[in-house]
Image (cartoon, rainbow, N blue to C red):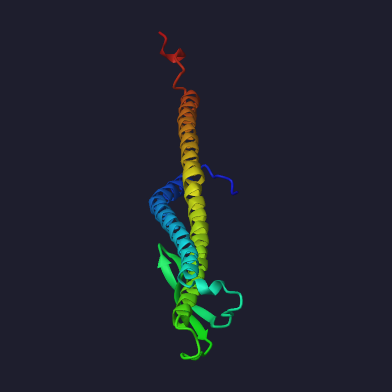
Amino acid sequence: MAKLRLSKNSLQQQQQQLKLYKKLLPSLDLKRRQLTVEAKKARAELASAIAAAEALETHIGEELPMLADDSLDVSGLVRMEGYQVGEQNVVGVRLPILENVEFTVTPYSLLGTPAWTDLLVQRLKDAAQARVQSRIAEQRVAILDQSVRRITQRVNLFEKILIPTAQKNIKRIRIYLGDTERAAVVTSKLAKVKQQHADGGWDTEEEQP
């Protein structure tokens, strides 16, 4: 850390820095509060996405009880090929957002398969997409939580370190400059007295009758 210079220029610099810190702090604190709200919403969305995925899988079992038959193999009927993730800007933070999920359905005969196969295909797609949505929601929570931690650290830096330090420095410089000014006045007076002595201003012998 650079040594504090006790001068008028240094005082001016500290005052400018303090003014800047106080100007930036409200916007940082506002962003922190906004991100905190968004993180809370993201956690609620994650809980909702997980609950939806679990509920959907349960519903599939209730809607299609025949899937409990071990002899029925539907494992290769629907295959997820991949998914596309976009980007969403939330309070200056880039968050992933699910845009599309791509599936491949193994061809099957409409006449040679049970009537509920079409429904099963759709439900398998829904369940897979719900699981992906849960993963994306989890990533959003992680990113927002990290952003909240970072902005909170910056707010604390301004509130607890930068602003108090600048205020302390300003006070210290002002005290030093005040003391220096008073010392200069005293020195000036002493110099004046010495000069008067040197000029004979204090010699009273010639004035006696």
Residue 122 position (above or below residue 196): below
Q: Position of residue 34 (x, y in %)?
A: 39, 55
Count the labels in the image: 0
Residue sitting at 56 percent across and 71 percent down? 68
Residue sitting at 38 percent across and 50 percent down? 26
- Tell me if 4 is positioned left or right of 41 in this view: right
Confirm whether residue 85 shows in the render: no
Q: Quadrant of the C terminus?
A: top left
Which of 198 and 174 lies nearest the eye of the viewer?
174
Residue sitting at 59 percent across and 46 percent down? 3
Confirm whether residue 124 shows in the render: yes
Q: Position of residue 106 (x, y in %)?
A: 53, 87
Which of 125 and 1 lies nearest the eye of the viewer?
125
Residue 184 position (above or below residue 205): below
Q: Position of residue 17 (x, y in %)?
A: 45, 50
Which of 41 and 124 lies nearest the eye of the viewer?
124
Which of 118 and 92 lies nearest the eye of the viewer?
118
Residue 96 position (above or below residue 31): below
Q: Position of residue 160 (x, y in %)?
A: 50, 43
